[in-house]
Amino acid sequence: MRFAWICALTLLLTGCAGSQIIDTKPLPQPEQEFPELNALPVKGRAPKTGYSREAFGERWSDNVTVDGGHNGCDTRNDILGRDLVNITFKPGTRDCLVLSGTLQDPYTNTQIAFERGEATSPLVQIDHVVSLSNAWQTGAQQLTPEQRQDFANDPRNLLAVDGPTNQQKSDGDAATWLPPNAAFRCEYVQRQIEVKASYGLWVTPPEKEAMARVLASCGQQQMPADPTPAPSQEDSDVLYPDCKAARAAGAAPIYRGQPGYRPEMDGDGDGIACESAR
């Protein structure tokens, strides 16, 4: 009787009547779930000191070693030609200079009619998915000038997008800005990871956390849109005497409606002042 009582008590406490099956498999770790993201170094943001647009070379330069380089067409028109449909090109430019087309904007999931001109060109802008400022503060300071020019013109890091939405993004990273079109966020973050890995850039802790949240939701039908505050506006009284000064300040090209834009600096009247010469 005493043995039976002891066994019964032990059974209640430990399950001695049989071996209890316990799942000892560890929970998935971030390294297992997102190997590409977790391969990126994680550091704090470096100072922006020394940053200028000119640190990334000539705007939309064809003199690069990435895809599209040395094809006789500037990068901006390369990306317009890639991302737009129903395109018409300016005669005599060997299908380079895009006059019109239609964009299915990935950031807003809206259709935008593009027509080269003062009022319409700024409606479609070319976004650096990893912004140049963010790149500068996460490792691009250590790149060579040639590597930075490649970065600024790498098609993997460029998208034709809705102009106002691109202005709202400014130089935000994944922790401060995501596309309003939730269905595009997975591809957007994956592009950022690919680009940062290709150029040896790092992510900040908040940036990595935001990327991991997006990747964890990939495959789901829809993710709720996060309200994103618009970045602070630049001084609306900015005035550049000429395009040389605008380029020296890292402000060019200047789109119509942006601080510093003046019609007399927009030689072809397409709404984009101080474009690099083609």
Image: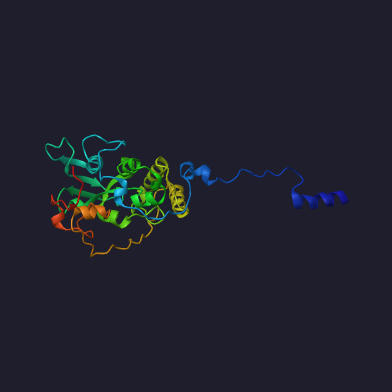
From where the camera sits, is residue 176 visible? yes
Residue at the far left in the pictured view: 91
Q: Residue at x 15, y 40 (%)?
A: 88
> Which residue is painted at 13% across and 51% down in the image?
267
Color encoding of the figure: rainbow
Q: Position of residue 140 (x, y in %)?
A: 38, 47
Q: Is residue 189 visible?
A: no
Instruction: Say left or right for 240 vs 46.
Output: left
Front residue (pair 80, 69): 69
Q: Can you give x and y, in whole percent of width and height, for residue 144 in the image?
A: 36, 42
Camera-side residue of 204 and 79 = 204
Q: Find the residue positioned furthest to the right.
A: 2
User: From the viewer's perspective, is 264 left or right of 157?
Assistant: left
Residue 243 location (% of width, % of height):
19, 53
Using residue 116 as the reference point, say whether residue 7 is left or right of it: right
Q: Quadrant of residue 235?
A: bottom left
Tell me the quarter of the image containing the C terminus.
Answer: top left
Instruction: Work out whether residue 150 or residue 26 is closer to the camera in this orientation and state it.
Output: 150
Residue 242, quarter of the rendered image: bottom left
Figure label count: 0
Question: Can you give x and y, in whole percent of width and height, for residue 173 in the image?
Answer: 38, 53
For residue 142, which quarter of the picture? top left
